[in-house]
Image: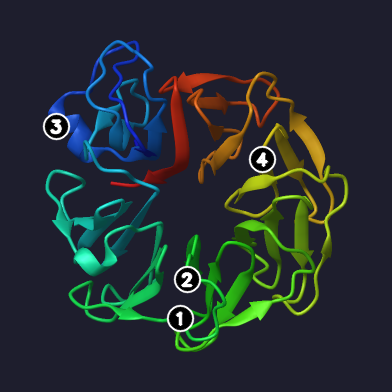
Amino acid sequence: MNSSLHTILTPLLMFWLSGSALPEGNQQDSSAYFAAVYFNRGSTAVGTLGDIGLFRKREGDTLWINLRPNTITPGVAFAKYGGASLLYLAGGNGLHRSADRGKSWKVLTGWQTNEILSVALHPTSSSILYISTPFGVFKSTDGGEHWGNKMRGFKSWYIRQVKIDLDVPESIYAIDEETLYRSVNGGEKWSALNVGVQGVKCFLQHPVDHDILLVGTEDHGIRISLDRGKRWRAAQGLPSSPVYALRSSQDGKQIYAAGYQTGVWKSEDRGRSWTNLWLATGIDAIYSLFVHPNNPDHIIVGTNGKGMFESLDRGATWRQAGLPFAHVKQIELYPN
């Protein structure tokens, strides 16, 4: 089955790369890549329409389309509940939801909660949502109609990211400006997990062994826990450089990491040790990573101002993958 890729750009540009769009009927029946992106101010490119929004490209196509122009977009999430497929966009002006793959949108948050940094969706209930903001974590139990602030236990209001545990939905993880927190009761109370260093930037739970947690940090590379956060240690082989992105293949056999002047690193022992995969010469920072769920040879990285690069051979060779000048914050593939 064809798929489509969604990329969030913040600010965003709309690019026509080489090639033409798929016919409308085929587009409706295919999956898509989505990307959260923004572009350098003052950059010029053929086919530009604004510089912020949510971009989408059908898998197998070369056309990127801005689905949500003029919306600063740090993140995107997708869930299917019964027959309903819902796309959520964490925007600078609220949480947006689309039930028709981006044709129309509804803003779910009011003026009190208008800058959304990330969104986490309950795996089985469309009623339960979490968002992270500069003003804390908020939870909705009615599909986004009403929101409650969930900040008991935090030491900072600014919450960078929120994620739901892969097999215990009442267990929630969140990152503030420095620290990884966890709630075991659906956000009612939070406790800091002592990873051993400050400056936590990103978080990954292993997709197969859910007891394995990893964090990327500002000055200490990657820290790993093998017992779901009780004890932490430094991963081996990495420099003490900022790590901004962690991503795993669907089967968990490969984990990738990237950050500021790090290139791309790979682990094949569930995060314990790492080797350099790609130097990424000339790229200052990599913000996002993507591994195709059905083809682990296909890896995509999102950079800070040089768009996306991809490898079709599990990192042996790389090529430009579109959206030059873009800061790419997140890359996802959502099925039809």
- On the question of residue 311 being in view, the answer is yes
Q: Position of residue 258 (x, y in %)?
A: 66, 40
Q: How is the image coloured?
A: rainbow
Q: Position of residue 100 (x, y in %)?
A: 15, 50
Quarter of the rendering occupied by the N terminus = top left
Of pointers 3 and 4, the one earlier in the residue sequence: 3
Q: Is there CB contact under 8 Å for labels 2 and 1?
A: yes
Return the residue at label 4.
258
Q: Secondary structure at mark 2?
A: loop
Return the residue at label 1.
151
Of pointers 3 and 1, the one earlier in the residue sequence: 3
Q: Which mark is residue 157?
A: 2
Q: Secondary structure at mark 4?
A: strand
Point out the frontmost of discs 2 and 4: 2
Asked if 218 appears above or below 155 in the picture, the reply is above
The local crowd at label 3, few if under 14, some if 14 to 19, many if 20 or more residues have their Cα within 10 Å, is few
Q: Which mark is residue 25?
A: 3
Q: Position of residue 150 (x, y in %)?
A: 41, 81
The local crowd at label 4, few if under 14, some if 14 to 19, many if 20 or more residues have their Cα within 10 Å, is many
Q: Given the image, on which type of amino acid does mark 2 rest? A: Trp
Of pointers 4 and 1, the one earlier in the residue sequence: 1
